[in-house]
Amino acid sequence: MKKIQLVSMPVILVLLAACMMVSCQKKKTFVENPNMEYRTLGSTGLRVGVIGLGCGGFEEIDSAASRELVTAALDSGMNYMDIYDANPKVRSNIGYGLGDRRNEMIIQGHIGCWWNGESYERTRNVEKCKKGFEDLLTRLNTDYIDIGMMHIFDKMEEWEAVQGTDYLQYVQDLKKQGKIKHIGVSSHNAEVALAIAKSGLVEVIMFSLNPAFDRVKSGNSPWDPKTFDNMLPGIDPVRVELYDYCAQHNIAITVMKAYGGGDRLLDAEKSPLKKALTRDQCVAYVLSKPCVAVSLCSVDNAGKLDEYLHYLKATDAEKDYNAALAAPVAQACENAGKGECTYCKHCAPCPVGIDIAKVNKLLADAQQAGKVTDELADEYKQLEHHAGECVGCGACETRCPFDVPVKEKMKEAEKVFGY
């Protein structure tokens, strides 16, 4: 009978240390890239690249393209990402894209996004919030989210309605449990964002900020072109107070819609400023605010990243936005009475299943081309539901943060595409 040889304690400790070392090697940690500019994310202490990644470009790409995009972003020094989309495909693809590099990406994930089986919903229902958040963790293959964002509060009554409720308690419980490290909120309304900032609850605010929106009087929709007929000569006082308060109290702002939504500020004909800005100028503008830490961009393939990252090597002259903003801004938009869709999908869900954002995008592309090309016709045909199925209930318009006349858009799309 063979004797069993016992392993001494020192040998066991060495073996355990070796295993831990191998395990640690698999989990990469982020190292600041000399080609990226970094800022501290408010009171969180996290160091973040000033150009961050949005999730808007992931909807139309597969897992392989997602991996390529996330890898390119991380390799370039980008280490901050917003994930609001509840679409399981999008979340799974991002999770696959991150792979074993999860620890290199600071994730801003939203609480209040739920997938109902067919479309995204914004909700304060705690059971739905829990399912949506746990799904996010599972699909990203992680046990925590760095910044837990309370998803879109654009009306003061919405914020007031959650005070003392289980929704707000759930968010705070997630932080106590370590499932989120910091609490944030997303908003398009400066007055609401300021009130939430003053509540002392949040460390990060995701906010729509650009040189056109800054000149819209508080309370008016920045997506109703008539608003820009009387554009303010300077920044709206409420926005000034918001930016100053955040800077003074070390609350970070991460910026969405830096290019006006749908790159509108890059096109002189579409821009409320009636003058085209460059990406570099838009980024320079938002980063000029001391409270801003990250300017988010949505990209659908790795090859386009250089367009957004050019800011990092742009000259001072290329970043200078003052000349463009000095131009007259009165009577900024001739398309009176109609808001412009940014394809954010906050209008969902449609009771008959229409992908409103996609229909609006195809309509805009057809109008820009001056005709319905074969490619656009094929894309429209492949949609499960079409504009002609709209029942005119108007539920989408009540959820749209930019006052887009969706019912009119659907009638227009039906006319253009024929059904």
Image: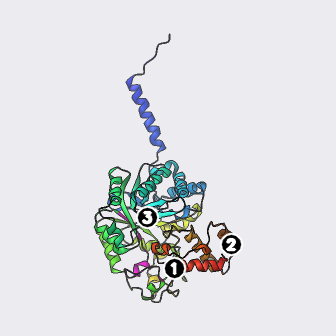
Could you tell me which quadrant the C terminus lies in?
bottom right
Where residue 363 appears, x then y in whole percent? 61, 76
Return the disc, 1 or 2, that comes first in the chain's sequence. Answer: 2
Return the disc, 1 or 3, that comes first in the chain's sequence. Answer: 3
Assign a secondary structure to mark 3: loop
In the rendered structure, are the residues bearing label 2 and label 3 in contact, judged by CB atoms less than 8 Å apart? no
Disc 1 versus disc 3: distance between alpha carbons? 34 Å
**Residue 89 counted in the magenta span:** no
In the rendered structure, are the residues bearing label 1 and label 2 in contact, judged by CB atoms less than 8 Å apart? no
The image quadrant that residue 390 belongs to is bottom right
| Amino acid type, mark 2 | Ala
Return the disc, 2 or 3, that comes first in the chain's sequence. Answer: 3
Please tell me the numbered disc located at residue 377: 2
User: Does residue 248 sit above or below 224 in this rendering?
Assistant: above
Please tell me the numbered disc located at residue 50: 3
**Dominant secondary structure, magenta:** loop
The image quadrant that residue 292 belongs to is bottom left
Where residue 337 appears, x then y in whole percent? 49, 85
Please tell me the numbered disc located at residue 405: 1
User: Which residues fall within the magenta stretch?
Assistant: 204-224
Mark in front: 1 vs 2: 1
Say left or right for 333 vs 41.
right
Disc 1 versus disc 2: distance between alpha carbons? 23 Å
Is the image coloured rainbow, by chain, by secondary structure, or in one colour? rainbow
Where residue 88 appears, x then y in whole percent? 53, 56
Residue lying farthest to the top in this orientation: 1
User: Does residue 258 sit above or below 16 in this rendering?
Assistant: below
| Amino acid type, mark 1 | Pro
Mark in front: 1 vs 3: 1
Report whether residue 411 is seen: yes
User: Does residue 365 sit above or below 28 in this rendering?
Assistant: below
